[in-house]
Amino acid sequence: MENKKITIEHFLKFKKGDQKLTMVTAYDATFAKLIDQTEVDAVLVGDSLGMVIQGKESTLGVSVDDVVYHSQCVRQGLKRAFLVADMPFMSYQVSASLAVENAGRFISEGGAQAVKLEGGEEIAETSKKIVQFGIPVMGHLGLTPQSIHQFGGFKVQGRSSEARKKLIFDAKALEGAGCFALVLESIPLDLAQAVTEAVRIPTIGIGAGPHCDGQVLVIYDLLNMDPQFNPKFLKKYANGFSIVKESVGAFVRDVKEGKFPTEEHSFH
């Protein structure tokens, strides 16, 4: 495993090279430290924390303070992987000046190396302004969870001819604004391929097929912490739900049956 710290320069290499970029979410130091022992290239403190950590139905209730706090936690566990912080709902849409201020907090307080914004041409100027202040920006197109009310739920995007053209246009607009990478979420695989070929910055897919320059998954999803969450795009790499349930259940039985603690676990 390469121990060299990942920087923004590495991202363009994934566009030019044969290897795919990998990114996972994390929300605390323990998971971050575990992830950093692998060859994962980037860690995202996603506003998905609203759903997987806070138990909410969407990402819309996540605050700037929430993401700053969880970024601080994740930063403590990372030495190698590149850290990206999600800018939550209404932290960048109101004005460019507010966006720059909030983005600065994720870097200076949260310890992130970049921020991620959802949206296309409509947030290109805001993204450009953030970049001009020395803060790297990752874009996010397709199914943008902060717009679920507009979309009518978590649905695949970019199926119509007009939507396809708009998404490619938006991708080029974000590239022109200085974004260093693009997340493509829940779009047809041929559209993701077209976007990937249309821009010179790496694309990172989630539910966007195999043709992107990289892939991202939520750590809780790939570990199968919620067996009821089974979207088509997800591949589960462990049975985390059973491991936790069985382990805690065994602890409970041992305590109730007087099998734990024993002298082995006691001080004299």
Image (tube, grey):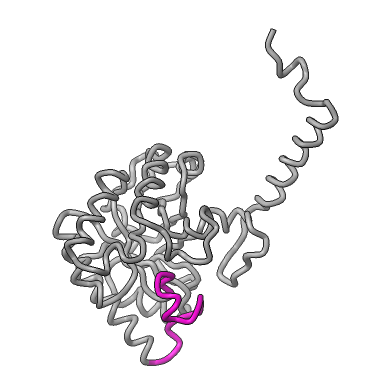
Q: Is residue 247 left or right of residue 9?
A: right
Residue shown at 72% from the left, 40% from the top: 248
Q: Nearer the viewer, residue 56 or 13?
A: 56
Check the image and report above or below for 223 versus 202.
above
Q: Quadrant of residue 221?
A: bottom right
Q: Which residues are magenta?
A: 143-161
Residue 149 on the magenta segment: yes
Residue 224 on the magenta segment: no
Q: Residue furthest left?
A: 132
Q: Quadrant of residue 116?
A: bottom left
Residue shown at 41% from the left, 47% from the top: 70
Q: Position of residue 244 (x, y in %)?
A: 68, 45
Check the image and report above or below for 143 versus 39.
below
Q: Is residue 44 left or right of residue 209?
A: left
Q: Position of residue 137 (x, y in %)?
A: 26, 60
Q: Residue furthest right?
A: 257
Q: Position of residue 252 (x, y in %)?
A: 77, 36
Residue shown at 46% from the left, 54% from the top: 25
Q: Position of residue 63 (x, y in %)?
A: 37, 57
Q: Residue furthest top?
A: 268
Q: Nearer the viewer, residue 191 or 74?
A: 74
